[in-house]
Amino acid sequence: MLVAERHKKIVELVNERLSIRVTELSKIFSVTEETIRRDLEKLEKENLLMRSHGGAVSIEKDHGETSYLEREITNAAEKKAIAKEAVRSIEAGDQIVLDASTTAWYVAKELEDFPLTVLTNSIKVAIELSKKEQIKVISTGGTLLAQSLSYVGPLAERSLGMYHVNKAFISCKGVHLEKGLSDFNELQALLKKQMMDIADETILMVDSSKFGTRAFSQIAPVSKIHCIITDSNIDERTKKQLDERNITITIAK
């Protein structure tokens, strides 16, 4: 197979599956993983795909991400209540990371102006916090996802790896007690996992509709969460199962 033909088929596979691993491409085309990595590097430079850890993702669409405007009005009351509860656990002098979720934006809006360091990949969170003089804001930078107004990709991942924070505040699209946390977008999922890795404590902010569901990309096992802030509609069985896993549950009022 000619190199140009292999490149064409790689792009087709990535767009069809949304994401694919280097190891899988190596087997499909019977070439070394190093060859595939060079292929992906070239194709990324041509803006035909985006590389991720161990593979590539499609840039044809926003990988299933819901637009920010749509997310702002979905379960808005629950998200605002969850954000207010999350703010209660943030103290002066803390170093925290906020993801690009709508709930994180509500946290930014609710925060008082006091000494605090906030690391984020969200443009909306950064803009909101820019109004507060005592809060130091560090943006990851990276590749912009227009739908979520957030940065992702290798630059964002390397940026996060330079820091350590007390608390990570994240949200996600699915919380499955056996299969773990998940998100629609692989690049966001990778970044959220890294946010958890650099934090002493991870606080998950999700409304009750997320429990028992799974999205496309895995983030981490539920055991990696220290506390979950959710709404009062969470069922008793789920609460019991989380309690058995020693995960603190806080119900937002």
Image: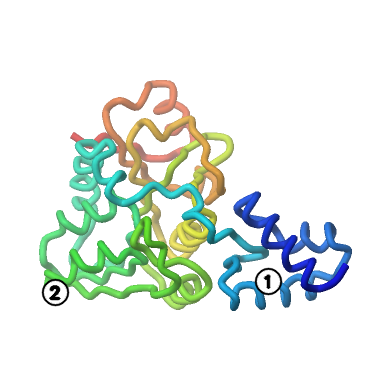
Please give the name of the residue rendered at 52% of the width and 37% of the height, measured from the top-left corner. 214
Secondary structure category for the residue under label 2: loop
Secondary structure category for the residue under label 1: helix
Please give the name of the residue rendered at 73% of the width and 77% of the height, measured from the top-left corner. 38
Q: Is residue 231 above or below residue 155?
A: above
Front one among 48 and 39:
48
Q: Which colouring convention does the figure follow?
A: rainbow
Q: Amino acid at mark 2?
A: Gln
Front one among 78 and 149:
149
**Marking on residue 134:** 2
Q: Mark 1 — residue?
A: 40
Q: Position of residue 63 (x, y in %)?
A: 51, 52
Residue 35, located in which quarter of the rendered image? Answer: bottom right
Please give the name of the residue rendered at 70% of the width and 55% of the height, measured from the top-left corner. 13
Q: Position of residue 250 (x, y in %)?
A: 29, 38
Q: What is the C-alpha distance between the residues marked 2 and 1?
A: 43 Å
Front one among 154 and 30:
30
Q: Nearer the viewer, mark 2 or mark 1?
A: 1
Q: Position of residue 216 (x, y in %)?
A: 56, 44
